Image: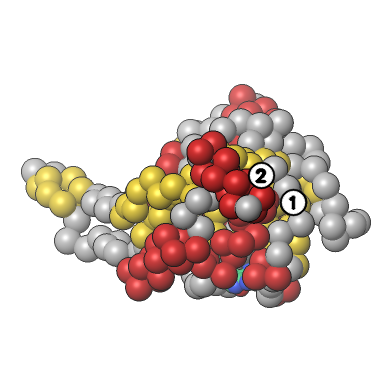
Amino acid sequence: MFFYPPPLIKYELNTMLKIREGELVHLIDRKGKRYQIVLKAGSSFSFTRGTVSHDDIIGLEEGSMIRSSLGEKLLVVRPTLAEFISKMRKGSQIIYPKDIAAILMLADIFPGAKVLEAGTGSGALTMGLLRAVGMAGEVVSYERREEFLEIARKNIETFFDKVESGDREGSGKLVLKEKDIYEGIEEKELDRIILDLSEPWRVLKHVEESLRNGGILLCYNPTVLQIYKLSRRLELKYERSFRVMGIYEVGLREWEIKGRSMRPELRMIAHTGFIFVARKCSACEQENKLLTQINAD
Ligand SMILES: C[S@@+](CC[C@H](N)C(=O)[O-])C[C@H]1O[C@@H](n2cnc3c(N)ncnc32)[C@H](O)[C@@H]1O
């Protein structure tokens, strides 16, 4: 499977152009309620406050206001990636945008990077990664459940563009693979590996072979027991190959501003997951010499 045209090109062009047929837009009412539609000439969108013709939206500038047949004012915007992720179809539990933002920074995902992730789930993180690696980068994503891969593919296509599916292995900007990562990683010399699955310690030996020296391994897990087991395994078995850089948790609190009231929202998404970051290293020169000596004796 591959991505064509590269998602970044389409995204950048879109933000400069007027809204076109086939585009995904959000209509936001005065109370902040969002309606997501894909524009099709001749179609219309109906909701409790009237009807809007798609033709009236096509050709508008992003940020325009339109009125429904019953006079409801709606703001027309292209959804941000975070807004789309909140609305998209979910098969598996997703990584929330607040954590995706931190992951992109903590794993230092850069334009041109070759990144492998598992599992794909609903594709939320995949989309963040795709945008961060840009036109010169590549994202390979492993998922062992076919139905999740299909949901992810549809989500990615809705936000970016078609994921061509002539060849299930494929090549290009995005490679979606129906594969169990516990059985191995085919790619080598990867810049980054991101794991969002329940037993990341089972992947360490494959990560050791596939991540380049200096590359970053980032694991995302909801419970501290998983992080503990991962750290212990790394310490006991892979100490020569990895250096732990940090363990993090992200809290993001929204504020409510209504008239003269300005205060933190009463409800927030509290604990979601821990972010564990390690760097791949080669053993020290001295250790290598020692090992060579021991082997020679
Ligand atoms: C929590 S979800 C991932 C969510 C995803 N990061 C997102 O943001 O949408 C975990 C996924 O890992 C997949 N998975 C679990 N073990 C796996 C394995 N050994 N190989 C590949 N995928 C695996 C599951 O099927 C599930 O879809």
The residue sitting at 83% across, 47% down in the picture is 171
The residue sitting at 41% across, 70% down in the picture is 229
* Circles 2 and 1: CB atoms closer than 8 Å: yes
Q: Position of residue 263 (x, y in %)?
A: 12, 49
The residue sitting at 63% across, 53% down in the picture is 297
Q: Secondary structure at mark 2?
A: strand
Q: Which one is in front, 246 or 59?
A: 246
The residue sitting at 85% across, 52% down in the picture is 170
Q: Which one is in front, 147 or 89?
A: 147
> Mark 2 = which residue?
190
Q: Name the side, left or right, on which 261 lies relative to 284.
A: left
Amino acid type of the residue that numbered disc 2 sits on in the rendered structure: Leu
Q: Is residue 35 visible?
A: no
Q: Secondary structure at mark 1?
A: loop
Q: Which residue is outermost to the left?
A: 260
> Mark 1 = which residue?
187
